[in-house]
Image (tube, rainbow, N blue to C red):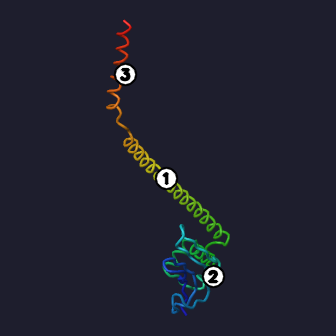
Amino acid sequence: MAVKIRLSRRGRKKLAIYDIVIADARAPRDGRFIEKIGSYNPNTDPSTVVLKNDRAVEWLLNGAQPTDTARSILSHEGIMLKKHLQVGVLKGAITQEQADAKFEDWKQGKEGRKQGTADVKSQQQAEAKQARLDAEKKVNEARAQAIAKKNVVEEPVAEAPAEDAAEAPAAEEGEAQA
């Protein structure tokens, strides 16, 4: 019996969530399976993977073949590396302590890369937000200037005759006192 590690779809339309299952190769995609070893949610950013690492390694060592997508997920989580190191231990190439140390080094590096990616992403979001605020400020200033320009009353035409009339009586008073 050929055993596969593959994804089984569940969830609603356009919002799929996948179970990572061990199944007979002849079984339907969403049908009968031997064991559920995890879940994968591609709808979150970053994608969420919950996995029973020990069971996945055990099935890989027993000969289960992952599909392309499942292999990608397992590789991303470090399961394929762990299996590779365990095969080295079984063949006597390295000791279990060396394998564990290599895996921990990889895991720490992976966490650093994840944190760096998260920092870059949050920085990009902050920059985009600031750019949107600056653009909105420019639009608001342009609107305020247009409204101010529209509300300006042309008073110089109306004031010119009034100033002449005010000067005339003052001039007459000055002539009368002389």
Label 1 element class: helix
Nearer to the camera, 18 or 61? 18
Above or below: residue 67 compared with residue 151: below
Q: Answer left or right for 85 relative to 121.
A: right
Q: Nearer the viewer, mark 1 or mark 2?
A: 1
Crowd class of label 3 (few under 14; some 14 to 19; many from 20; radius 10 Å): few
Give the Cα distance between marks 3 and 1. Answer: 60 Å
- SS of the residue at dot 2? helix
Amino acid at the residue labelled 1: Glu
Occupied quadrant, residue 147? top left
Position in image of residue 20 (x %, y %): 57, 81
User: Mark 3 belongs to which amino acid?
Assistant: Ala
Q: CA distance from mark 2 to mark 3?
A: 104 Å
**Which mark identifies residue 127?**
1
Who is closer to the viewer here, 10 or 130?
130
Judge from the rendering whether residue 174 lies leftward or rightward of residue 55; answer left or right.
Answer: left
Q: Quadrant of the C terminus?
A: top left
Judge by depth and name the residue closer to the eye, 143 or 111: 143
Residue at numbered disc 3: 166
Of callouts 1 and 2, the N-terminal one: 2
Q: Residue furthest right?
A: 97
- Say which mark, if any, is on residue 3: none
Q: Are marks 1 and 2 in contact (CB under 8 Å)?
A: no
